[in-house]
Image (cartoon, grey):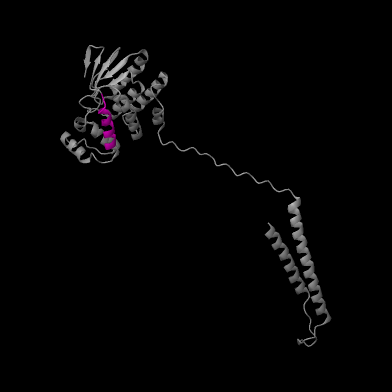
């Protein structure tokens, strides 16, 4: 600001001088010849007024600087505005809403809350065109494995039980049983699944993940055993591998024979494609399932 005022005052003085010079030209003696001592009286007067104008301009400039400095001391200083605080922008969620709900849900949650979430998951999985997000598959598997590792290979169970046999990728059958679970678990009824959840049907992945979630939510009411199809040597040829490749890698291997499917799996088992990763993740849960159960000390289930 100070530089602006000084430049304005200096410009004013210079303009006044230019104007003074243009208005008081030097007049030479008659004949038009320039020689020393031949300036007229009017020329002499112009230089005197010229010096006077410079003096007045200097006074004006000094007065302007003095007024400016006086103003700085007399006028109140403007209040500096506080710097705006940075706005906290929430980070976008990296997980789908249903995955977040699963992440925060434990067996300690109220029964009604667990049932509501389970019903919502069942409704989503019932759509044949729905593909479970890989993040949800991994999270369900990672949460259920510690539960299964805490159980023995031979379960000794007591209470009122429903025993469910092979479902083999038939989601309609599992949906019926799941609705029975929602009705009976609050009453104290328990459910034992005997294995063979995958292969042959078209929704083996949805059945496996749904049962894992039910085990997470109701660990003392839902029990899972391992069948012969819960092994890579079988489900690589009978449907689960084919389903993972189709849904997550968009690769159709259904035209290959069972032996050819096993051969292709062995050739790409070390690949890092989503389909292979989901396939291995589900089978890692199968490796932790119990093998048999004795119910009420009298019924052997395998």
| 88 left or right, relative to 13 | left
Quadrant placement of the C terminus: top left
Q: Is residue 124 or residue 58 the one in the foreground?
A: 58
Viewer-proximal residue among 114 and 256: 114
Give the x, y percent position of residue 128.
31, 29
Q: Residue at x 31, y 26 (%)?
A: 212
Task: Please tell me whether residue 160 is drawn above or below residue 232 in the rendered image.
Answer: above
Q: Write down the quadrant of residue 59 in the picture.
A: bottom right
Residue at the right extreme of this rendering:
41
The answer to which quarter of the image holds residue 188 is top left
The image shows residue 154 at horizontal and vertical percentages of 24, 20
Side (left or right) of 52 relative to 131:
right
Relative side of 35 to 140, left or right: right
- In the displayed structure, 146 sits above or below 157; it is below
Per the image, is 40 magenta?
no
Residue sitting nearer the eye, 12 or 168:
12
Q: Is residue 176 visible?
A: no
User: Which image quadrant for residue 189?
Assistant: top left
Number of numbered markers: 0
Magenta-colored segment: predominant secondary structure: helix
Q: Is residue 98 above or below residue 220?
A: below
Residue 114 in view, yes or no: yes
- The N terminus: image quadrant: bottom right
Residue 8 position in % (x across, y down): 71, 62
Span colored in magenta: 276-289
- Residue 42's spot in the image, x, y percent? 82, 79
Residue 163, compared with residue 276, is above or below; it is above
């Amino acid at each position: 600001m100070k530089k602006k005022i000084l430049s304005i005052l200096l410009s004013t003085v210079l303009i006044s001088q230019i104007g003074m010079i243009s208005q008081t030209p030097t007049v030479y003696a008659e004949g038009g010849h320039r020689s020393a001592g031949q300036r007229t009286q009017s020329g002499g007067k112009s230089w005197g007024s010229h010096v006077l104008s410079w003096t007045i301009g200097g006074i004006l400039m000094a007065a302007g600087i003095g007024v400016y400095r006086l103003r700085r001391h007399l006028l109140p200083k403007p209040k500096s505005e506080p710097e705006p605080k940075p706005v906290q922008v929430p980070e976008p969620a990296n997980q789908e809403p249903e995955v977040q709900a699963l992440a925060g849900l434990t067996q300690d949650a109220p029964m009604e809350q667990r049932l509501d979430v389970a019903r919502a998951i069942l409704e989503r999985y019932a759509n044949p065109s729905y593909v479970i997000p890989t993040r949800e598959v991994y999270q369900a598997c990672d949460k259920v494995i510690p539960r299964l590792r805490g159980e023995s290979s031979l379960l000794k169970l007591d209470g009122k039980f429903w025993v469910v046999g092979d479902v083999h990728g038939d989601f309609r059958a599992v949906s019926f049983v799941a609705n029975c679970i929602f009705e009976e678990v609050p009453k104290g009824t328990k459910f034992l699944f005997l294995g063979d959840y995958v292969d042959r049907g078209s929704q083996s992945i949805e059945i496996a993940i749904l049962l894992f979630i039910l085990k997470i939510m109701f660990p003392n009411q839902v029990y899972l055993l391992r069948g012969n199809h819960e092994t890579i040597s079988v489900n690589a040829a009978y449907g689960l591998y084919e389903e993972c490749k189709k849904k997550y890698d968009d690769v159709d291997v259904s035209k290959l024979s069972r032996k050819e499917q096993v051969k292709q799996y062995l050739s790409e088992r070390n690949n890092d494609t989503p389909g292979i990763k989901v396939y291995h993740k589900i089978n890692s849960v199968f490796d932790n399932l119990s093998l048999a159960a004795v119910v009420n000390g009298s019924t052997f289930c395998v």
